[in-house]
Image: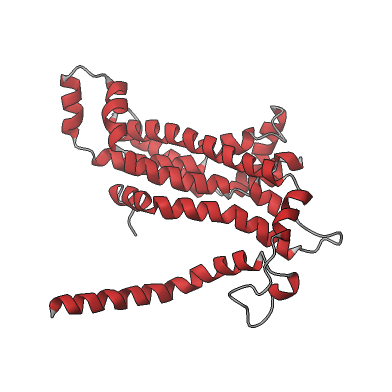
């Protein structure tokens, strides 16, 4: 009897979760299906969930109107470099704040956390002037350096610090007995244990860089150097109006890989946040 009730409860729970997922799934489904519809059917009411006339012509036009393949590569490699750089900086800084005692440690950590309170719009003008003086405008360097040294890295440092604080101190004592120095202890013991936190940091850092919009429109002016969020705004007709089918096709190709990555890695993401005490 209890097993039957348990099975019924699970079915009911899954049913409720499916209903709650509809508002989140429907916009993505509409975007993907509308990208293969004729323009006249995109805003038809009531909206059709399955296209009656499917065509991939809009996807072909995406690559004809812009160097979209190059822009895709730009976003991918920038996000990869930013993710690796942020992991390196946040892991080292987080370990230092968690395990190394030095004068002014807490004050310095608070100063670092203040970086989370400063909106990116406040610093964009001085950053532009700085990178312009260095000759880095219309290059990808600002899109790489700003996230690694900015607010995303600060949040990543906080997450890594929280994880390293939770590690038992006996691990470091055993490492010292074995003759390991500070960096060797970090590299061979603390860092391998921090895989859940590293996974969480990697996911949100990659997504942040992939979706970055303000910095690209400020620093980049050449279409072949655009990233995907900036490229999506360029699909307009001769009168400046939106090309809905082309925009939806480009947006689908931009969003689907990110959704796939998140679905595959969501367990690692949740586990990493749970280990750092950031559960909601």
Q: Residue furthest toward the top?
A: 179
Q: Height in image: 242 above or below 173?
A: below
Which of 201 and 265 lies nearest the eye of the viewer? 265
The N terminus, quarter of image? bottom left
Which percent across, then down, holds residue 184?
A: 29, 22
Q: Residue placed at 28% from the left, 48% from the top?
A: 275
Q: Residue furthest toward the right?
A: 238
Which of 29 and 210 lies nearest the eye of the viewer? 29
Q: How is the image coloured?
A: secondary structure
Which percent across, then down, holds residue 40?
A: 75, 74
Q: Residue placed at 53% from the left, 34% from the top?
A: 81
Q: Residue placed at 51% from the left, 49% from the top?
A: 207
The image quarter containing residue 76 is top right
271 lies left or right of 85: left
Which percent across, then down, holds residue 87?
A: 43, 36
Q: Residue furthest toward the bottom?
A: 46
Q: Residue placed at 71% from the left, 34% from the top?
A: 137
The C terminus, quarter of image? bottom left
26 lies left or right of 69: left
The image quarter containing residue 35 is bottom right
One can see residue 150 in this view: yes
Which of 60 and 159 lies nearest the eye of the viewer? 60
One can see residue 115 in this view: no
218 lies left or right of 8: right
Which percent across, then down, holds residue 138?
A: 72, 36
225 lies left or right of 106: right
Please give the count of numbered marks on the rendered protein. 0
Q: Height in image: 33 above or below 273?
A: below
């Amino acid at each position: 009897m209890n097993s039957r009730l348990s099975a019924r409860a699970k079915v009911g729970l899954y049913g409720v979760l499916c209903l709650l997922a509809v508002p989140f799934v429907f916009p993505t489904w509409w975007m993907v299906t509308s990208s293969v519809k004729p323009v006249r059917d995109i805003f038809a009411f009531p909206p059709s969930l399955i296209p009656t006339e499917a065509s991939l012509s809009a996807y072909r036009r995406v690559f004809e109107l812009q160097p979209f393949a190059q822009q895709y590569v730009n976003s991918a490699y920038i996000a990869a470099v930013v993710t690796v750089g942020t992991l390196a900086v946040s892991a080292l800084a987080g370990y230092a704040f968690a395990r190394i005692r030095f004068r002014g440690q807490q004050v310095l950590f608070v100063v670092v956390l203040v970086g989370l309170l400063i909106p990116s719009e406040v610093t964009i003008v001085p950053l532009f002037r700085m990178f312009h003086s260095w000759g880095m405008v219309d290059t990808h360097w600002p899109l790489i350096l700003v996230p690694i040294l900015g607010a995303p890295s600060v949040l990543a440092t906080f997450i890594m610090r929280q994880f390293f604080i939770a590690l038992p101190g006996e691990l470091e004592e055993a490492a010292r007995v074995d003759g390991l120095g500070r960096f060797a202890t970090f590299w061979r013991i603390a860092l391998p244990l921090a895989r859940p936190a590293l996974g969480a940091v990697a996911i949100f850092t990659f997504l942040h860089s992939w979706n970055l919009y303000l910095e690209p429109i400020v620093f980049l002016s050449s279409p072949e150097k655009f990233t995907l969020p900036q490229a999506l705004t360029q699909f307009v007709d001769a009168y400046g109006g939106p090309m809905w089918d082309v925009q939806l096709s480009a947006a689908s190709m931009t969003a689907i890989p990110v959704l796939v990555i998140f679905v595959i890695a969501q367990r690692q993401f949740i586990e990493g946040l749970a280990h750092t005490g950031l559960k909601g």
